[in-house]
Amino acid sequence: PIHKLREIPPEYAERYVERVDENHFTIRDSVRRRIAFSVFNLLELDRRSLPPLDLVYCQNVLIYFARDLRLLLLNRLASLLRPGGVVVLGSGEVMSYTNPMLERVTHRAVLAYRRRSV
């Protein structure tokens, strides 16, 4: 919906957004072609050969694992991110999480961490 456009910084909207009609917008094909989705078992991360990732969207997934396993999986996901890459989580998935590779993204509606630059 067009009202969600307010949440996108103007410089990004100018570059990456197209209006569909007066009530809707979409992300430009040039961006959509760069996105790859992958489905796999998080418990098998160490057995997968993955390239460095820009974004991991793992919302409402880790809540199904024990706390110690959540932290282990989150640390593994952090190690897969490129510098500047982001992992997005559900709001209740981890509490008081810290990792020296990550910094918390400050946003009112999202629990996310960005990989620090080297």
Image: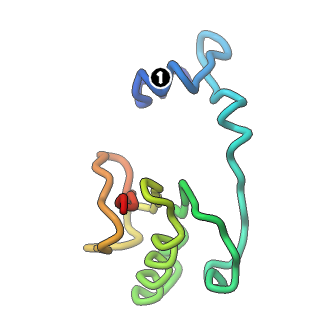
In the figure, is residue 29 to the left or right of 71?
Answer: right
Check the picture and name the quadrant holding the N terminus.
top right
60 relative to 110, above or below: below
> Image quadrant of residue 114?
bottom left
Residue at (54%, 64%) from the top-left corner?
A: 58
> Image quadrant of residue 10?
top left
Q: Position of residue 31 (x, y in %)?
A: 65, 35
Q: Position of residue 67 (x, y in %)?
A: 40, 85
Colouring convention used in this rendered image of the protein: rainbow
> Image quadrant of residue 19?
top right
Residue at (48%, 73%) from the top-left corner?
A: 79
- Reading the image, the residue beneath label 1 is 3
| Label 1: few (<14), some (14–19) or many (≥20) C-alpha neighbours in 10 Å | few
Which is nearer the eye, 3 or 12?
12
In the figure, is residue 88 to the left or right of 118?
Answer: right
Residue at (69%, 31%) from the top-left corner?
A: 30
The three-letter amino acid code for the residue at tag 1 is His
In the figure, is residue 49 to the left or right of 13?
Answer: right
99 relative to 4, above or below: below
